[in-house]
Amino acid sequence: MRHISRWDLDKTYLRTEFDTVRDLVRTALERADEKRTNPGAATLLREMRRSGVVVHILSGSPEQMRRRLEDKLRLDGIAWDAFTLKPNLQNMLRLRFRALRDQLGYKLPALLDARTNMTGDDTATARETLFGDDAEADAFVYSLYGDIMAGRVGEEELRAIAEKGRVYEDVVEGMVRAVRRIEPHDVVERILIHLEGQTPPGDFQIYGPRVVPFYNYLQAAFVVHEDGRLPARSVLRVATELVTQHRFDGDALARSYKDLAKRCHLRGEKVLEIGQALSDWESEGGVLAGAELRAMVERLPAYAEIAKTRYAERPATEDHLPDYLALVQRHNPRHKRKRR
């Protein structure tokens, strides 16, 4: 069965600054080779694609940046199946100035449209892993999307949330039509939120355990591997990039796992697979950062025991449903900072 990954770009995949007008202008003028990728992100995305995962790029960057963004991804060796950008010029021509910064009225319809336009025998049940960041509304929108897809948020509640979020009426009607076409299934497997803005991870507990805030892409790789969406050697390749290009040592790599374990985001499974994958790789010769990788895998079993204990002790949250109506007006941290 297909597995789908949907990736934001700015502050998730790319190291982008857009908090000031000067930042926006500089970002718009950057050449593809000047854009910086967050450490480990390109390796993880390449490895997921290599593993057969469908890749959908869903970014709030304007459509006018498509060529440069596509060139950047090609430079990074990234292939994709779909690429959606925000129609900001169209919004400006229609005098829809709220839409220029709104994410709820852009990303949620885009996610619903992407899902309802899928074809294939597994259209209703293919599961998804969503990647975003803490600078915009990703945790809110992705969680709401997941609960709509699962049938936990219906048409009436969606209308109320969208109205309170000041989504344009015709956009709301389009979302409602999409919801009516959906056969409910719990398809959103995992929501991974890059803590680019260093938001406290505890701030995301309101969305339940499906949302995993992470500091580096090795942490994301650990989660996706345990979910069965990434081979063990791919985790090692992400770790290798962090060692060779970003000065991580074996202890820092292992502590990335320990942090997730203490926050109850790992079950403590599959660490032996990572160790075996390293042994197999070493037997083939030529392992970069081999000493640091070996130091990491030697520490992982002890940290996996922490993960098992903490996961077993965590409160039952299977029926958790965020109060989206209460959250909608503060779902965008960047706007919230601006109002202070």
Image (spheres, rainbow, N blue to C red):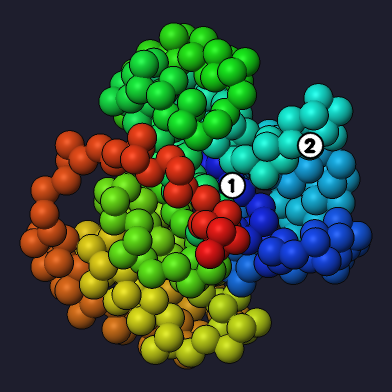
The quarter holding residue 225 reads bottom left
For residue 7, which numbered disc appears in the image?
A: 1
Answer left or right for 339 relative to 283.
right
Task: Tell us which disc is closer to us: 2 or 1.
Answer: 2
**Residue 205 location, x and y as percent?**
29, 56
At label 1, the amino acid type is: Trp
Mark 2 element type = helix
Q: Secondary structure at mark 1?
A: strand
**In the image, what residue occupies the spot 48% across and 78% down?**
282
Evaluate whether residue 122 shows in this view.
Answer: no
Q: In the image, what residue type sits under mark 2?
A: Asn
Task: Kindly identify which numbered label has been placed on residue 313.
Answer: none
Q: CA distance from mark 2 to mark 1?
A: 19 Å
Where residue 60 appears, x then y in whole percent? Answer: 68, 44
Residue nearer the viewer, 11 or 124: 11
**Residue at left 48%, top 89%?**
249
